[in-house]
Amino acid sequence: MRIVEKSQLMSASEIDRTIQRLAHEIVEKSGGTKHLALIGVRRRGVPLAQRIAKAMRGIDGVEVPVGTLDITLYRDDLSKVASHAVLQSSDISFGVDNMDLVLVDDVLYTGRTIRAAMNGLFDLGRPKRVSLCVLIDRGHREMPIEAQYVGRSVQTSDTEIVEVRLREIDSEERVVLVDRVEP
Amino acid sequence: MTYRFRDLLALEPLSADELTFLLDQSKLFQEIQRHPLKKLATLRGKTVTLAFFENSTRTRISFSTAASRLGADTMNLQAEASSLKKGESLLDTVYTLNAMKPDCLVMRHAASGAADFVARNLDIPVINAGDGTHEHPSQGLLDALTIRDRRGSIENLKVTILGDIQHSRVARSNIHLLGKFGGQFTLCGPAMWVPRELEQIGPPGCLIRRVSRIEDGLEDADVILVLRVQTERMYEPTLSAEEYILLYQLNAERLRLANPNALILHPGPMNRGVEISPEVADGPQSCVLEQVTNGIAVRMALLFLLMSGATEGGESALADEASGAPNASPEKKESTHAAD
């Protein structure tokens, strides 16, 4: 099995512009930011949430708390992962009761990650509302889950992989579509 | 860094990196203890068998609580009520328990090496909850986690261990763990409980000295590990409880000899007024109750770590009776079920 890059879906500047737009959309649709908070889903949802929060600061100085959520304990495929699962830290320093939470992740695919993330959030309390913001929606849902804020929707086949590479984690900044091909 | 074994039988074979990994994972489970909703569904549908061939209350309750907070069910075997009394061999008992298809076995046994022996004959993860005078790895981990929480580090500690070290698996697990982080040990107790061989049990380069006067043992200590005086062993030397109290009890006056911030650990159950005075046990330097709380986090981390990951076909309930299928672990285990 080889991995080949098929196309670039977003450049660094396109990612940047998309984040600006998503920040505006969230502020606009939330009707008040008093109870608003962003929750980045590990790993790449975390820098994305931080960037969106930073962009919000540029919109009338809106200050929104950002939390980090690790979904390992809530995954539905733990007995299928190859080796021992490794937990990462979650860091949500504010109470979630009655909050208007926006989950942030890089790619929306089957919806299972978001299902797990919602279970994790509800262990912490009872948010008033939970919405979802993703950089890329690539389709192929296996759960009744949709994103309210989408950077870009992309048609993909199920052998393809959408790779979001962010400078905080990866050595480069762009979104690419890769494919698995038989050698 | 991750963990390369299928089981947790001892801390001795683990590297400093692996131990740090286990402590870091435990730390994350500590935070879950503060959630309004402590119960997870992570291991729902999985079963942990608790086989305590030697009496235990706190360790068993701690493992049982850890399993239940992760959503797993537990099966309990208690030595007193078991067929061991009727003459069944350890291996037969364990095979019987295994035939009920648990996903993990937590066991305590009076014989050193018992957990290792059982693990070599089973294809599910085994956690040693104390084997004779050998090791009690989850206790070593929770002690280290408690120290790290209070001090911020477990590097280069001066550790004094008081009491019957010869018979203490807790002492050994602590030496194997803290010794890998530069710990130096002072073993202090009546001579027959601190034989010379103990100087050699640490990792390479680990300094272990023995002293018989408690006043000599406490100077400069960062951590004082007080062991329970096993009154059932008191008859064997000619040492009475009164003499022990006089010579070895950790009291406020003696504690002043140690580093002013020295931490006091005790694996429990405490004989208040024997090995430790009540004022010391309840004082600000005592970590006894934190140890208990941390025990749950450590055991949740261990159960989660060893019970996540691939099992044969994702389900074991209908697997072949001979159970020859190895787990997806780099450590190779052979199934010797037929060779009994």
Image: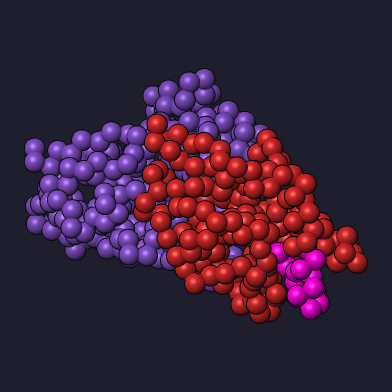
B252 lies left or right of A159: right
Residue B146: % across, % down: 57, 49
Residue A124: % across, % down: 60, 70
Q: Colour of chain B?
A: purple
Q: How many marks?
A: 0
Task: Tell me the residue at 34%/57% (across/down).
Answer: B56
Residue B140 visible in rendering: yes
In this view, the residue in front, B74 or A139, is A139
* Identity of the residue furthest to the top in this view: B205
In this view, the residue in front, B248 or B46, is B46
Q: Is residue B214 above or below residue B66?
A: above
B319 lies left or right of A167: left
Q: Colour of chain A?
A: red
Magenta highlight range: A23-41
In this picture the colour scheme is by chain
Is residue A146 within the magenta segment? Answer: no
Quarter of the image for residue B65 reads: bottom left
Residue B173: % across, % down: 44, 38
Task: Tell me the residue at 49%/36% (across/down).
Answer: A3
Task: Tell me the residue at 79%/70% (across/down).
Answer: A27
